[in-house]
């Protein structure tokens, strides 16, 4: 008889796993007006059961998600690798321009991200990139896959999955 493949997953979402942030994504050579969202984070880890019959502790997973949320909460999300925005680092802030629009933000109000666009697709990919090394380093962890979802408004989310 063939062995059945078994997948076990744990997930955490919403509740205190949210943050508010401003951004202006670029799309097809245009730039959205500056605006903000109340983002909700979804994390899912797939793996084998540990000796104590857990994939992983929900509290630890939520702690990792909260750390990401706190780093981005009430910040302007700067897509540092943008091909479309004019970005200048100043002594005390950042200047961001697109065509005739120019914005200045104090450094303390900006989360500088090494991404080309602040879409939920890229933000969830960045989050997965922050979490994957942590999960890979956990002793006794038998994780296979991490999925990060980021909802910018109800019914509108981007997802990224990475093998661990």
Image: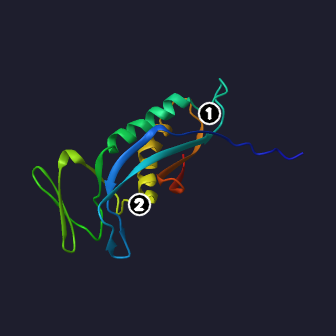
Q: Secondary structure at mark 2?
A: loop
Rendered location of residue 21, percent (x, y): 34, 50
Q: Secondary structure at mark 1?
A: loop
Rendered image quadrant of residue 85: bottom left
Q: Residue furthest right?
A: 1
Rendered location of residue 148, percent (x, y): 51, 48
Front-most of residues 49 and 87: 87
From the viewer's perspective, tell me whether residue 135 is left or right of residue 99: right
Which mark is nearer the camera, 2 or 1? 2
Say which residue label 2 marks. Answer: 119
Q: Is residue 68 above or below residue 31?
A: above
Which image quarter holds the N terminus?
A: top right
Rendered image quadrant of residue 48: top right
Residue in the picture at 38% in, 76% down: 28
Q: Residue furthest left?
A: 91
Say which residue label 1 marks. Answer: 55
Q: Residues within 10 Å of mark 2 (few under 14, many from 20)?
A: many
Q: Residue furthest top?
A: 52
From the viewer's perspective, tell me whether residue 96 is left or right of residue 122: left
Rendered location of residue 24, percent (x, y): 32, 62
Rendered location of residue 141, percent (x, y): 56, 33
């Amino acid at each position: 008889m063939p062995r059945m493949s078994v997948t076990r997953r744990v997930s955490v979402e919403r509740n205190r796993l949210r943050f508010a942030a401003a951004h202006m994504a670029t799309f097809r050579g245009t730039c959205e007006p500056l605006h903000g969202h109340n983002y909700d984070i979804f994390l899912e880890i797939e793996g084998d059961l540990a000796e104590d019959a857990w994939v992983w502790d929900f509290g630890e997973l939520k702690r990792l998600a909260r750390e990401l949320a706190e780093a981005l909460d009430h910040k302007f999300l700067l897509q540092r690798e943008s091909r479309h925005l004019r970005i200048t680092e100043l002594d005390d802030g950042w200047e961001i321009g697109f065509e005739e629009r120019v914005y200045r933000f104090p450094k303390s109000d900006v989360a500088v991200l090494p991404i080309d666009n602040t879409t939920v697709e890229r933000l969830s990919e960045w989050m997965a990139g922050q979490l994957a090394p942590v999960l890979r380093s956990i002793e006794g962890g038998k994780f296979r896959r991490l999925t990060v979802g980021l909802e910018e408004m109800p019914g509108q989310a981007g997802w990224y999955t990475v093998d661990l």
